[in-house]
Amino acid sequence: MQLLKRTLLLFVAAMLAYSCADENESPRYTGQIQFSFNPNATIKPGGRTAAEFPDGSYLIVTIQSANGQAIFTREQVELVRVGDEYISEPLPLVEGNFRLTDFWVVSPSRVLLYAAPKEGAPLADLVDDPLPLTFSVGKDQLSNVGVQVIDVSDTSPQDFGYASFDLEVVRKFQISVFTPSENGLEMSSATATLLDGLDTLQLESLDAKVNTLGFTEAPDDTMTLAITKPGYGRYTRKFTFNQLKQELGGTPLTVVLEPAVTFIALADANSFNPYSFRLSGTGGQFTVDWGDGTSSLFDIGAYETYEHVYTSSGTFFVSITGDLQNVVEFSSFYGLGPIVDHIDVAAFTELNDLRIGLTTSPTSIDLTKNKKLTSIMFIGNDMAEVIIAPDNILTYVSLDGPNNFTTASLEAFVDILYQSVVASGRTGGYISLYAIWYETDNAMIGPPSPATLHKLHSLRNDYGWQLDPLP
C-alpha cells in the first residue's frame, strides 16, 4: 500500500511539473523543487484534526541560495492532496544548492495552520530536521523535500523561532487579453488596473501572453479589475480572489476587448461646466464608459453635445462603443473636454470632420485609419504631429498655433498631403498654418522648411488651394 501511494505521489508530482511549466520561463531555470508533508503526522499542541485542514490551503515558503541570496521570499505555492499527504506545485530553480528558511501552511482565508520550526526554537526538538533545510537541485530534475510541520494552535510565533507570522502574502491568478484581427482573435498587450472604488491599488503592464498577476489584498475583499488598451473598450469586473479562483478552476481569465474610440479625459471636479464633447451621425446609439465607474448610453444625433459630471479630479480612460460606423463628426473645443496622453479615433471609420481646438490635447494623433476624413482642425492645442493616410482625401486643413509642431513634423504632414493631392488631382482645398490662430501676420507654425514651402506654393499655384498665411 505504501509503495502504491508513493508511486501515485511521484506520478502526480511529474504531472504537476509538466502542467506548471511556463513556456515563457527564462531558460536559466534548469531544475525544479517541490515540497511534501503529512498534516496527520504532525505534532498537534492544540489537537487540530485533519478535517480542519481546508481545501485550497497553500504554502508560504522562503528559499535562499547557499550563500544567503534570496531566491523566493514568502512565495505562495499551491498544494495538491494525495491521500493523507500533500505535495506542492514545483518551483523552478537553477542547478545548485539551496536553503529552505520559511515553511507555513495557510488556509484560503489566510489563517496560519501549520509551520516548520526553526533551529533553536522551543519547538525545534519536536521535529527531526528544523529549518533551515538544505537541498540540492540538479539539471533537468524534479527534486522533492519532505518537511515536518507542527500545528500552530495554542502556540506563539516565538515558539517556532519567528518574531511574528506576517501573512502579507501574494495571491496569484493568470490572465490573457485578446483583440479581434483579420485572422480572428489574437493575444494582445494591455494595462491592468486593480481598483478599490477610484483608488488605484495596483497597475500592471500585460504582455501578449498568459500573464500572472499577484496582489496582497484579502481573499474576500471586493475589488475591481480594469483592462485598458488604446483603441479598445474598457473592460471591468468586480471580484474577490476566492470567487475568481473558484470560477477559473486553475485556468487563465480570458478577456476579449472590442474596438472603441478611446482617449484620456482630464477632469476638473471643481469646474462649473461638465466634461463634454460633440459628435453627429446618421442614427444609432453609443455607450461612453467615462472611466470613473459610470457609463452612459446616448442616441447619435445631429451634432449634439454629450456631457458628464466627474465627482473627482484627475485623468480617466474614456472608451466609446456602439454604432461608431454611423459617426461622421467629432469635436472637443474651448477646454470643455480636455484630452491628454492619447486619443484613438480609428473606430470612427466613416468620420469626415474632426476638430480639437483651443484646449488641452495629446501631442500626436494617428488618422491613417480614417480615410473618409475631408476636414480636420487642430488649433491652439498641444499637437506636435498629425499622421494621415497616404490615400487621404482631405480638402480642409487647419493646424493653426500655438502648438508644438516642428519644422520636421510639419514637413512630414505636408509631404503626405501634397503627394495625395498630386495623385488624386484634388483642387480647391484649403490649408491654414498661422503661428498664432488669432494673428493674421505671415508667421507660420514649424516654421516650414524650403522644401515644405515649395510644396505649399505648388498646392496654391498648381492645384488652386487657398493657403494662409501667404509665405
Image: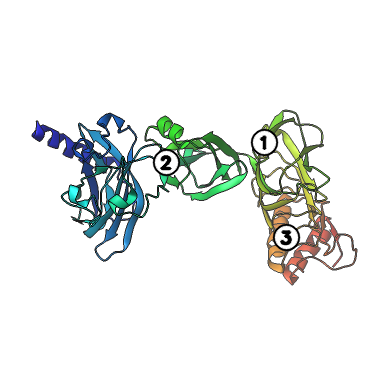
Residue on which disc 2 sits: 173
Residue occupying the point 28% across, 37% down: 46
Task: Residue lying at the far bottom in this picture: please name it.
Answer: 450
- Mark 3 is surrounded, within 10 Å at the Cα level, by few (under 14), some (14 to 19) or many (20 or more) other residues, namely many
Q: Secondary structure at mark 1?
A: loop
Image position, residue 78 (x, y; %): 32, 41
- Mark 2 is surrounded, within 10 Å at the Cα level, by few (under 14), some (14 to 19) or many (20 or more) other residues, namely some
Residue on which disc 3 sits: 414
Tell me which label, 2 or 3, sits earlier in the chain: 2
Q: CA distance from mark 3 to mark 1?
A: 41 Å
Q: The residue under label 2 is which amino acid type? A: Phe
Image position, residue 224 (x, y; %): 55, 39
Name the image quarter holding the N terminus. Answer: top left
Residue occupying the point 47% across, 41% down: 218
Tell me which label, 1 or 2, sits earlier in the chain: 2
Q: Nearer the viewer, residue 248 or 87?
A: 87
Q: Secondary structure at mark 2?
A: strand
The reply to whether residue 261 is visible in this rendering is: yes
Occupied quadrant, residue 197: top right
- For residue 74, side relative to residue 455 (left or right): left
Image position, residue 2 (x, y; %): 10, 34
Residue on which disc 1 sits: 294
The answer to whether mark 2 and mark 3 are in CB contact below 8 A is no
Q: CA distance from mark 1 to mark 2?
A: 26 Å
Q: Secondary structure at mark 3?
A: helix
In the displayed structure, 444 sits above or below 280; it is below
Q: The residue under label 1 is which amino acid type? A: Thr
Name the image quarter holding the C terminus. Answer: bottom right
Q: Nearer the viewer, residue 201 or 107?
A: 107
